[in-house]
Image (cartoon, grey):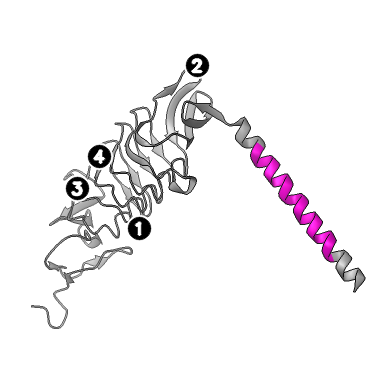
Amino acid sequence: MNDFVEQRGCVIRKWATAMVLVCLVCRSRLCAAQTYGDFQYTVSGADVTITGYTGSGGAVAIPPSIPSVGTVTSIGDGAFSARWGNMSLTSLTIPDSVTSIGGAAFYYCFNLTNVTLGTSVTSIGNETFHNCIRLTDVNLPDSLASIGDSAFDTTGLTSVTLGDSVTNIGPAAFSNCSELTTITVDSLNPAYSSVGGVLCNKGRSTLIQCPGGKSGAYVIPQQRHLHRGLCVHRLWAPHQRGHP
């Protein structure tokens, strides 16, 4: 019995020591973090990635560069996520220097209402704006090529316009958007098209996303496939029995 107690005490002491070491490592990393104003960042060559935000929220404009350091070209994964307490962010301006926005960068920013993306953004990561329930306005620039899985899942968007450069849209990119009524695609887009405000592939053989706020019935033409992640509310297929 005494041996058991002694072994258990040894395990607890080792666990406590490990936790202290983890805390010390985390603390040292935080102390060593590079900061510029309210922003935390990392540097690779002359390229700066914004990795965190410590400000009071409200309207935030990301700087295009860090003086004597480099140009801000990307926003890191989870950089502004509300998981780190950034629930007071209301609007955001991303400069033209930024080309990529990481996954979950603005995850659960409940009070974010509008986002202005710079003209150079080419990729938006997975769940970047997931559950930004008050986000009603975001411009998708002509430079945009890729939209990640669930990137705008559960947002307040009312309409989406995709340019001719978007060639990759992940599953559920616009799912659970109950206010979204139409998705429009540039006619010159080589990968996607829009039929009656519904997102389809270029050949219109696959229905990718029916906007969650679209009213009335939508007739699915015969031999059209349904894409995973599709919002299927109020859809009718002609071959279904009982179709009006």
Q: Earlier in the sequence, mark 3 or mark 4?
A: 4
Quadrant of the image occupied by residue 44: top right
Secondary structure under tag 1 reads: loop
Q: Earlier in the sequence, mark 1 or mark 3?
A: 1
Measuring 12% from the left and 68% from the top, which residue is drawn there? 217
* Figure check: 198 above or below 117: below
| Nearer the camera: disc 2 or disc 1 | 2
Q: Which residue matches tag 1?
A: 171
Quadrant of the image occupied by residue 243: bottom left
Q: Which residue matches tag 2?
A: 68
| Nearer the camera: disc 4 or disc 1 | 4
Q: Earlier in the sequence, mark 4 or mark 1?
A: 4
Residue ranking furthest to the left = 244
Q: Is residue 167 left or right of residue 76?
A: left
* Highlighted magenta segment, given as a residue range: 8-27
> What residue type is disc 1 on?
Pro
Q: Which residue matches tag 4?
A: 139
Q: Which residue matches tag 3?
A: 185
CB atoms of marks 3 and 2 within 8 Å: no
What distance separates the C-alpha of mark 3 from that of mark 4?
Answer: 13 Å
Q: Is residue 14 left or right of residue 80?
A: right
> What residue type is disc 2 on?
Ser
Query: In the rendering, at what x and y percent does residue 1 appear?
Result: 90, 74
What distance separates the C-alpha of mark 1 from that of mark 3?
Answer: 17 Å
